[in-house]
Image (cartoon, helix red, strand yellow):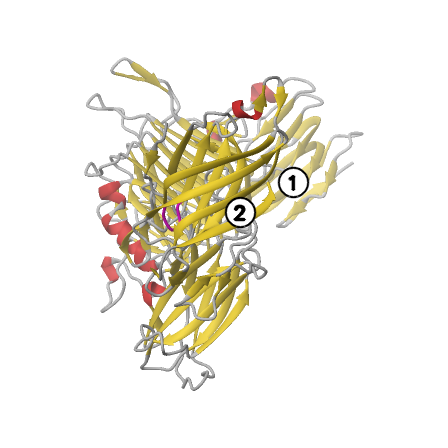
Amino acid sequence: MKKILYCTAAMALAFFAVSCQQENLEPVATGNTVTYTVEVPGALATRALGDETTAVDKVYYQVYRATEVEDLSKGFVYDGNKPVTDGKASFELEFVKNQNFVVLFWAQDTDLQMFNIVDLRKVTLTTPGASNNVNAQVFAGSNVVTDCVPANGGKVTLSRPISQLNIATTAESLKFGTKDIELNKSTVTVKGLYPKYNVYTEAVSEDKTNFEYTESQVPAATIDVNAKTYTYVAMNYVGFAPKESTTVDVDFTITTSEGDVTHKVPNVPVKPNYRTNIIGNLLTEAADYDVTLDAAWDGVNNNEVIVEGLVKNTEGVYEIYTANGLAYASQNLFAKEGGSYVLTADIDMAGASSVATKAADALVYNSASLTHTMKARSFEFDGKGYTIKNLPGMFIAYTGSATSVVVKNLTLETPNVAFNVEDTPETDGVGAFIGYAGTTTTITLDNCHVNGGKIEGGHWTGGLVGYAAGYSGNDGPVFETLTIKDCSVRNATVTGKGSCGAIIGHATGDDWTLVDMDNIVVTSNSIISTGDSDNKAGSVMGTLGNAGQPKTVNGVTKTGGVTIDGYEVSGNTVKSNNVDNAKLWGRQGNSNGVLTIDGEKVEAFDTSKIDLSAEVNVPGATVNLLPGEYKFPNNVAEGVTINCAPGTVFTGTSGLNINGSTVIGATFENEGGVAVSGTIYGTFKNCTFEGEEALRWCYSTAGKEVVFEDCVIKTDFRGFHFD
């Protein structure tokens, strides 16, 4: 049986050109450079011998005048090579201003002796060498430089001009009766390939030639093809073949413990940058083999170029690597196509503008709204650990009609977001990552970060997300789960007239909304609500709504709420109407709402109305208070410990005759009045007392001990004495 399958396969490495200056180039310019960064890809998506490219340790380049590169009698202007370290090489090439050039690239293992690369327009395969050389990979490509500006924004995609030929056998054919057959060595001859290759034209030349890969040890490895595992007999990189593919005859001999086995396989398809597999029962008497062009290679050689800086790869994923590519994708693809996107380089949007502040000739960035026009109802963006700097708008303005939105592994550095700062109408959510997270079943921000910059909005403004709300109406309800995991906001400014928080402005705008924040970091930010409410700004979130109670819609019951599990909050300035707030949140607008922090339910709705008398009236009890404003209870039983989280404040005038019990970490505050008055009997650790007078007419009970340990008294006290 013989079966020939034609499928796509690709590998690539990337070059990036960054800067250019002006000077002369005769014979080599001084100054005026284009900086190239060469990136060698790592392992491929499928497991096969030769997947790793770590052996590629040098990139060679030749610079030709654009008017001479096609004339093979003309030589290059200058050439050179640079080492590849950890998969990358960065170097500068110099060019004459107002002239055009072509740069040819070739990357390989320094010790590889297979090719003559004196002239990259006439690369010659001279010595195939021993079979099974996993280090025989090579990569080639070109780049046009026009008046010191490299084509395609400076990114050059290299691909293999050769093919990989795998020969492998089934596990069944490795048995001779009950005896295992040992594989020793193999020899491979490929008949009908071309010996020369032009890197510039990608054309092969001269008559076909036979290439023999001499006997060498069989690789101790396996390959997976069509969900089945085979044992390698031989692996070779072979070349050259024309871009449109060709067929060759392959002869190979396998030396085994039971003798030699020889096969002649005619009409084997090969194509540059493709993997051809010859597999089957190769050691049995009646050979049974399949020949395939493998579709499982991973890369960009066959990517569809959308615009400069944006390609669609063979798996249907959009790859973005320049500011132009991101701007185009946001305006033309995110909302219309949905689907999957990855960032493959750091991007700086400096000089780009939003439509509202469009400058002449500026790159325009439109924040995408994911509406019902999306072809795919899901959206996923993987930043791959890269950074977008100076984003001039929201990454996603509105999640809308998408059923699933995922943004992960992305940092926004110094974003500059400003939208509806006058808060008219009072319906807009503004956030660096998502403005209005609405009516979407699942929304996930995973490993997403804001470093510096400003986010300025109106009604609901957050460093990451402005507003989140499902929909609990009978006409198409949507229970929304927003997950914010391993995310941070640092050194940013978040301002708005309404709800403001470093993570989210308003957390639950509808009963059918669950906001889950895990392992979040909020440090050194300025979070300011400029409206006339004094409780709409919080370090983590500005406000939260009434989600938290079971609600049934059309026979389906859902329970929303807000949870925070693991947080680091420090060094933030948080003000609402110029009133400081030390809590993680500003206000809960409805008593039905539920906020849970580190597994404990927080009475986020006006803690000053919470009655603590029952809890503190149990002798020996420990009472743990989460941040909020409270009224200190009148009676405290003996041996009670009241542990107060940072941001726990007892307001008004408190009486501290607590029967020798202990209060830890509290602030006793009465602006314009007396914070503490009357008889004091107890222990106070790490407490703060402040007011017009912190302590006034305070006495101890005769013979009773009063302890102040590491406490701060911020204002005057008088009539304060102990017997």
Element type at mark 2: loop
Kindly identify which residue carries mark 2: 52
What secondary structure is the stretch in magenta mostly built from? loop
Q: Which is nearer the eye, 493 or 80?
A: 80
Q: Which is nearer the eye, 19 or 634?
A: 19
Which residue, as the protein is rendered here, is positioned at the far right?
703
Q: For residue 471, what is the image quadrant? A: top left
**Residue at the spot 23% in from the left edge and 49% down from the top edge:** 332
Kindly identify which residue carries mark 1: 687
Residues shaded magenta: 270-274
Which amino acid lies under the numbered mark 1 shown in the image of this protein?
Answer: Cys
**Crowd around label 2: few <14 · some 14–19 · many ≥20 (10 Å):** some
- From the image, state whether disc 2 or disc 1 is nearer to you: 2
Q: Which is nearer the eye, 717 or 254?
A: 254
Quadrant in which the C terminus appears: top right
Give the percent coordinates (x, y) of residue 341.
35, 45
Distance between mark 2 and mark 1 Cα atoms: 61 Å
Q: For residue 264, what is the image quadrant? A: top left
Give the percent coordinates (x, y) of residue 402.
27, 35
**Residue at the spot 38% in from the left edge and 36% down from the top edge:** 292
**Residue at the spot 30% in from the left edge and 59% down from the top edge:** 308
Residue 179 magenta-highlighted = no
From the viewer's perspective, is residue 692 above or below residue 19?
A: above
The mark that comes first in sequence, 2 or 1, is: 2
Element type at mark 1: loop
Residue 272 magenta-highlighted = yes
Direction from residue 467 to residue 49 in the image, left or right: right
